[in-house]
Image (spheres, rainbow, N blue to C red):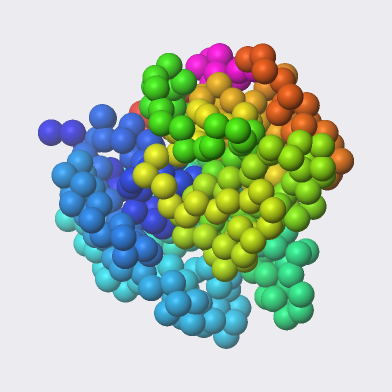
Amino acid sequence: MPENLLFLSHRIPYPPNKGDKIRSFHLLDHLRKQYRVHLGTFVDDGKDWIHAEKMKEICGECCIVPLNPRLSRLTSLKGLASGEALTLPYYRNNTLQAWVDSLIENLSIEKIVVFSSAMAQYVEKHTDALRIMDFVDIDSDKWTQYADSKPWPLNAIYRREGQLLEKYERKIASAFDVSFFVSPQEADHFRTIAPECSSKIHYYSNGVDAEYFSPERAYPNPFREDEKAIVFTGAMDYWPNIEAVTWFSKEIFPLVLKSEPRARFHIVGSNPAREVKHLSALQGVTVTGRVEDVRPYLFHARLAVAPLRIARGIQNKVLEAMAMAKPVVASPQALEGIVENESCICARDEIEFSGHVLRLLGNSGEMSGRSRILESYDWERNLEKIASFLEGKS
């Protein structure tokens, strides 16, 4: 019988179709090859309930709890009275806590993997177990970035959240046996924030399913034959993505259209916010909403863009485009942990962005970053770092 392991994630790690779920699913899938993985998690999107059975099939015991984002936002305000980060009461749930405590006691669980800092609160008191934290990104820093782009009073609330969540992140990193981040840059940044934890801070890079995101098969063309398509992929109810496509559509794409009237910008992703839907009124901009498969959009596009100005860690959208052998123009924030090369180009402002996009639209030659994907972003090889710590080999 495999050894028991508890895995906690703030969002059901299936299907692996967006940033955090891609990483959490591959981590869970890797762990279950060696352990009997018991899953505690939330469902914050009603459409994801159909995937609960999948988790029960591949895991041992499961506690999958509904999370109503609107109600949880109200609950999170308790943090204003308690002096803690609002993120913690947002994800606090008595049912899940009771399940975690009972499971650890009844199965004598000695190994715990926590995905996302908010879930660490469920095992803070279980100090006898080997506890591994996958922070992924420095969430506190993202809240601070949000504060810089929001008006009062939101900027004050977000800045408070950044400060208090950073304090909690340091506490967890100090208490847990080891903590992981998504890139060496992210790990180094956290070491400067929490030098007392420096020896326990590590990283493992995201990967990409290079077989799934393969350019070696035929895909239907979702574009008109006469257009030169530019794509952005991602969840379109996520503020950094909203801000990115708004900036590109309003400030960068008009510069592209002046020189290349056949250019078209396609925003491809689920749950587009009101601000994103309004962008479809702009010349040459299309908002698709959710699509069954993003691969045809990547395959038939001339290039992908990632103009994120609020970002931490490695962007899966960049890896997926590279795996599909497409050039990418991205902001410095979107290229953290990814080496710039001829097919993955950094642009810092509107002029650089539009210039690189126009050059690539006019370049009919092949520019592929796929070989780098195959070399450096293999999930199995990267996840061995966590497996080694669990087995006491590091």
Is residue 327 positioned above or below 84 on the image? above
Quadrant including the N terminus: top left
The residue sitting at 44% across, 62% down in the picture is 121
Would you identify the image quadrant in which residue 369 lies? Answer: top right
Residue 262: percent from left, percent from top: 69, 37
The magenta span reads: 367-375
For the stretch drawn in magenta, the main secondary structure is helix
Residue 351 falls left or right of residue 143: right
Would you identify the image quadrant in which residue 240 lies? Answer: bottom right
Residue 374 falls left or right of residue 187: left
Tell me if residue 198 can be seen.
Answer: no
**Is 369 inside the magenta-drawn segment?**
yes
Is residue 271 positioned above or below 222 on the image? below
The residue sitting at 72% across, 59% down in the picture is 145
| Viewer-nearest residue: 153 or 185 | 153
Residue 16: percent from left, percent from top: 38, 42
The residue sitting at the right extreme is 351
The residue sitting at 49% across, 82% down in the picture is 74
Residue 328 falls left or right of residue 112: right
Residue 51: percent from left, percent from top: 25, 52
| Viewer-nearest residue: 286 or 85 | 286
The number of discs equals 0
Tell me if residue 263 can be seen.
Answer: yes
Residue 11: percent from left, percent from top: 39, 56
**Is 201 inside the magenta-drawn segment?**
no
The residue sitting at 38% across, 36% down in the picture is 26
| Viewer-nearest residue: 108 or 224 | 224
The residue sitting at the bottom extreme is 81
Residue 46 falls left or right of residue 120: left
